[in-house]
Amino acid sequence: MTEMFWLIPLAPAASTLILVVFGRKLPKKYVSLLACGAVLVSFAIAVISFLGLLKTASANLPLIKSLFTWIRAGSLKADFSLQFDSLSAIMVLVVTGVGFLIHVYSIGYMSEDKGYARYFAYLNLFTFAMLLLVLASNMILMFVGWEGVGLCSYLLIGFWFEKDSAANAGKKAFILNRIGDAGFILGILFIFLAVGSSEFSAIGSAIGHGTLTQGMATLIAILLFVGAAGKSAQLPLYVWLPDAMEGPTPVSALIHAATMVTAGVYMVVRMNLLYTLSATGGQIVAIVGALTAVFAATMALTQNDIKRVLAYSTISQLGYMFIGCGVGAYAAGVFHLTTHAFFKSLLFLSAGSVIHALSGEQDMRRMGGLKKYLPRTYPPFLVGAIAIAGVPFLSGFFSKDAILTQAFAQRQYFIWALGLAGAVMTAFYMFRLIFLTFHGNERLESGAKHHLHESPKVMTVPLAILAFLSIVAGYVGLPAVFGEKANIFGRFLEPVIKPVSEGHIGLGTEWTLILISVAVAFLGIFLAYVLYLRFPGIPGKLVAWFPGLYGLLYKKYYVDEIYKATIVNPLVQGSEWIYSHFDLKVVDGTINGSASATGFFGKVLSRLQTGLIKDYALIFLLGIVIFIGVLLF
Amino acid sequence: MIPPSYFFILSLVLFVLGIIAFFVKRDLITQFMAVEIMLNAANLAFLALAKLSNFLDAQVVVFFVITVAAAEAAIGLAIVLLIFRQKKSIKTEDMRTMKG
């Protein structure tokens, strides 16, 4: 049964085609049935394949299904072939499972929108591209999925393209991803140069046989990571993700929290042999991840837009995943990816439910006290916040702790400390969000309060399922203190991920680390409680005491402004200068000049054509005379 | 017996007269006649050569030339007629539509 895994991407692809062609004419009921049904079919096949995979002997892994040869040009060869192993299985389950819930949620969230069919067509296309990305068995096909999800991201961020800010945000995301993709393509080309093939199995065996030199491995690792930094919103290419919140909220949940932005993490894990071989490459991944985790968390502290807080939080959590990859804890990285997919999509969808209830209000300064109005949104939201904050016994605690423990075990104390600092801030800003939104005084605008209503069942049921998953998902990856065999998740991934020589730490140290993590989480929550619930006057005073620091954070370190001043504006002005000086004068001048020169010579030569027969006859006669003269003498 | 050089000289004189007439005259009909004179000058030269060298092929060529000249005169006169109907003139200066 596992052999039919290659059918997984088929259903969303077919649904996309139908929706693109007939979507306008179909009633909304059938559109939603078709779109959700397609993803559900994929999910069902994924589950069957996954169960089959559990029984498959590891010697037969990975399963590869080569559908046809796609490119063959000299030594460059790429098949359209799909691969299924434990890593792909986890990703496919997350993409189709969470994707299905978000599709269902969208039925309620988008019910009033006039682009209903278009929305579901994009969403299905995205699911197809993402499945292609995680199932591809070579870099080239993976790149097709990689670009496909980027395209869908662009389309969905700019879904409400009548709004200028949405259209611009779409463009920004697309362009920043292009920068990353340039590095990714170079990385693929260097792999071809060094290995001669882009199949993952060939790359793995080349590394195994030592044919890949250390320097080449580092070069490829860095180039590929540039691509990952673009797609997964890491420093310095993260600026597109906060703006991506212009899209519909379910899109933010699916693409910009749960799946697409984790593509970079998936790719690094897929290339784990490469990053293990190149110590420098791994180190760079870990440092960039750690810096991003802290940097983004500080920016989340002062934001007032409920979705932007979550966006910066996503960037920060992606940083944690890269810390995991960088210190060799690939399984922990994927584990955090999975739990994060649950609790972050939960948070986004709950935030969407709040926004929906308040008729589009996103500013937390005009919320507060919503707990009693939204009884079915508040509990899932709280569960998500507790999970991400790292409170024990929920999924986020186990996955984040697995990463930080591994960082400590690898003696990366600096990165470990950065991770802890990020964890305090994570707990703080999440509970700041909870307190500002659901507790305290009501600061609603009268119009919004009049329409205040709890969301329909089609939206709250997915929330409940995701909340359940956010609670229990952690128990498949328990830390080593509960026994060597407790980490089911890690052992499942072992065929794909070569275990790293673990810097062994005693059980006592590990318990200490866990206690520190717990303390850190509660410290953050306590601070938020004191500042925003107990003494709500303090934040205002803090702003008054440290206006410089607050301004710096509130304006997001002026990174957007710096990029604009140093890169965007010089580019625009340079282009304008070239347009007026080179395009208009040199290029257009050459074309116009050659045209008028031809016209001029034509005019001169046309004088020969007098139209008088006698002139022609005279020339004819002269010609004959010269001809005879030449013949005779 | 008339020496053959006389024939050639006559042929040359006729030919040059034809050229001069073609360039001096302005109406199409006279120019046509000039062309006919040049053709006949060439015919005369052919015949003289045939007589001189006992070569009969040249005489055959003369017949061809006469036939072609007759056909050409017929077509040419028809064209001249049509031009006259359109322009009310057969002066070559009046036909300058091909001027560049």
Image: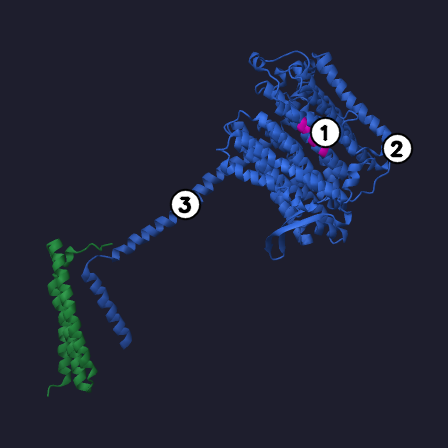
Pick the residue in front: A50 or B42: A50
The range drawn in magenta is A338-346
Answer yes or no: do the residues labelled 3 and 2 have beta carbons within 8 Å? Answer: no
Q: In which quarter of the image is residue A103?
A: top right
Question: Image check: A582 left or right of A375?
Answer: left
At label 3, the amino acid type is: Gly
Can you tell which mark lies on residue A469? Answer: 1
Residue drawn at the location 69% of the way across and 32% of the way down: A341
Pick the residue in front: A229 or A219: A229
Q: Which chain is blue?
A: A
In which quadrant will I find the N terminus of chain A? top right
Question: Image check: A364 left or right of B78?
Answer: right
Which residue position holds label 3? A589
Chain of the residue where label 3 is placed in the rendered structure: A
Residue drawn at the location 10% of the way across and 54% of the way down: B88
- Say if labels 1 and 2 share a chain: yes
Residue drawn at the location 74% of the way across and 33% of the way down: A336
Q: Where is residue A135 in the image (x, y as percent from the top left)?
A: 66, 43
Which residue position holds label 2? A507
In this rendering, which labeled residue sits more in front, label 1 or label 2? Answer: 1
Q: How crowded is mark 2: few (under 14 residues within 10 Å), some or many (20 or more)?
A: few
Pick the residue in front: A267 or A280: A267
